[in-house]
Image: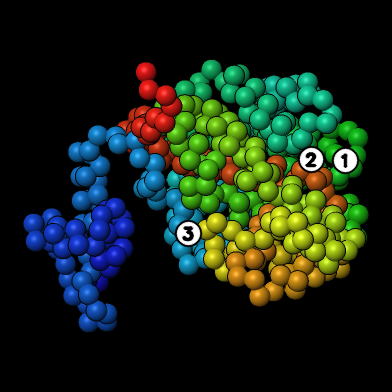
Amino acid sequence: MAGDTFLTTAEAAKRLDVKPETIYAYVSRGLLTSVRSGARRGSLFAQDDVDRLAERGREGRAPSGAIERIRTAITLLEDDELYYRGRRVTDLARTESFESVAHLLWTGRPEPRAFTAPAALVDVAGTAIAALPPSAELTDRIRVAVAAVGAADPLRYDLAPDAVVRRAESLLAILAESLSGASGGSIAERLWPALARHPEPGPGGPDPDDQGGDGSDGRVGPAVLDLLLVLLADHDLAVSTLAARVAASARANPYAVVSAGLGAIDGQYHGGASAMAHRFLADALDDPVRALSDRLRTGVRVPGFGHRVYRHHDPRADLLFAVLRDRVPDAPVLAAVDRVVEGLAGRPGLFANIDLGLAALSHALDLRPDVGEAVFAIARTAGWVAHALEEYDEPGLRFRPEGVYVGPRP
């Protein structure tokens, strides 16, 4: 058993998408071999054997259209923790750059390399963005830029893994540069000037080394942004990722895959959740108790609290708030958050989530109110491309659920 990885009966059943009793049927038929471990009760199964059986079942089965369970080796959500390819995300955020983590998601190997943006495509994206009205939000600009760059790339249908990775690198760099006008440095450093509430005129925006309005070193912003991009890069099969995978199953090109994901986040229950948390914290800055009381009185869910997946805490929010308390400890919004958290103490499931963290970051560093959704979109682009790469290896058009017709009969 030395050097091998073994699964419990429950873990093997989950991986094969069968009941635990079926596992023992597989053993009796010679499809799996069980072993005993003196350290724990029950049978164990070699992960390699389980994976081979899963692959055999997938190859011999026609696409069913089921989307409830999609096998993925990218992201694990377990016990209120988040992992990218087996590595804890909060650890990665402390030690790796966004570029490095993007490569981990795409290839399985972290690679801290710079992402370059072809000047011609930056011009294409910038021209498309310039045609929008000043009231357009950052995510509107991102959607338009992605579509324009895709239309300008004649080789966009090359779905070879290396080609997809190269396009993902350049797309992220193009988005950062076309939104801000900045060039050079990391994605976070190039994107940062676009997030300021009152950007300076000129192609470069505000100098990232200037003192921020909060009195902190301006270099705090890009560093925190890089950490945040890592935390948001993927989150298993969130609705936008599912949309991206469905597009990839039709062999849509990487730009179209990202556009599918961007379409899905354009709603209050996904990408727009941070905007609602931002408005809530704006009220809480004036009077946190009254802001909370107003939501509780009307029965409206308190924005930025609770989560559909996490049960007791959101590890991404925990790390972001810890960094904000370390870097900008005197930010008034943090005191407001503390008062709201105190007011919700004792209510099961009402813990601060990443949307509240995004909103707090925006207030603490005096950023645009739509920063949360934009940062989410840029970060999640890395995850959407990772899932597209995985989906390109699956049977095409495998997602075809059958509708249950409830209209009038002919």
Decide: is 251 above or below 195: above
Across and down, in percent, residue 394 comes to: 34, 36
Residue hosting label 3? 77
* Residue at 25% from the left image edge and 58% from the top image edge: 19
Location of residue 308 in the rendering, given as x and y in whole percent from the top left corner: 55, 56
Q: Secondary structure at mark 3?
A: strand
Q: Residue at x 83, y 67 (%)?
A: 289
Quarter the N terminus occupies: bottom left
Say which residue label 1 marks.
199
Q: From the viewer's perspective, is the residue at label 2 or at label 3 nearer?
A: 3
- Residues at marks 3 and 1, CA–CA distance in whole angstroms: 38 Å
Q: Quadrant of the C terminus?
A: top left
Is residue 139 or residue 196 the one in the foreground? Answer: 139
Q: CA distance from mark 2 to mark 3?
A: 32 Å
Q: Which residue is mark 2?
A: 194
Q: Callout 3, which amino acid? A: Leu
Helix, strand or loop for disc 2? helix
Q: Is residue 74 above or below residue 312?
A: above
Q: Is residue 404 visible?
A: yes
